[in-house]
Amino acid sequence: MILLAATAMYLAATVALMALTVVVAARTGLVHPRLEYLPQLVAYLILAAAMFLSLMLLAFGSRIFPLVAGACALAFQIACRDFGVLTQIVAVTDLLLAVGGFAAIVLSRTARHAYY
């Protein structure tokens, strides 16, 4: 439960910063936001959550799984790069599910925290 709350707080801060960035960029004329950008922004948010959980795992000593999961997601994106944003959304969603599930199991162990 605490892991979910920490991830939600991180994502809330990320959404706030992204929204502020879009507003500033739009008002200064650097970018003209369109709805076509929304899937890309969602993909970045999903990737941010996956990377946050990966860093949590790394902090508690799980080094191999986040590395392998990230490498697999990257390999999938490279192999299917012709499909555009859909490939990125599928890859980062799978990465989030894999890392999130692993983090929920590994970080919920009481003995895991006792050594750090």
Image (tube, rainbow, N blue to C red):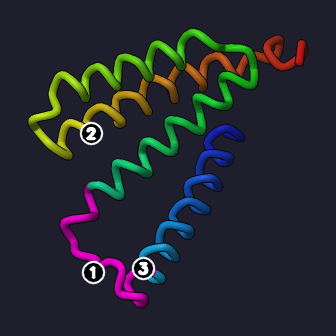
Q: Secondary structure at mark 1?
A: loop
Give the alpha-carbon distance from disc 2 to disc 3, as whole Å.
24 Å
Horizontal placement of 13 versus 68: left or right? right
The x and y percentages for residue 74 are 34, 25
Give the alpha-carbon distance from disc 3 to disc 1, as whole Å.
8 Å
The structure residue drawn at horizontal position 46% and vertical position 13%, both measured from the top left corner, is 68
Q: Which residue is mark 2?
A: 88
Q: Dot 2: within a 10 Å radius of its alpha carbon, few (fewer than 14), some, or many (20 or more) residues? A: many
Q: Amino acid at mark 2?
A: Gln
Q: Indicate which disc, 2 or 3, sits on the residue closer to the N terminus.
A: 3
Quadrant (top left, top right, bottom left, bottom right) of the N terminus: top right
Horizontal placement of 72 versus 5: left or right? left
Q: Secondary structure at mark 2?
A: helix
Whether residue 26 appears in magenta in the rendering, the answer is yes
Q: Which residue is mark 1?
A: 32
The residue stretch that appears in magenta: 25-39
Whether residue 82 appears in magenta in the rendering, the answer is no
Q: Indicate which disc, 3 or 1, sits on the residue closer to the N terminus.
A: 3
Position of residue 25 relative to residue 89, above or below, is below
* Residue 65 falls in image quadrant: top right
Q: Amino acid at mark 3?
A: Ala
Give the alpha-carbon distance from disc 2 to disc 1, as whole Å.
23 Å
Q: Indicate which disc, 2 or 1, sits on the residue closer to the N terminus.
A: 1
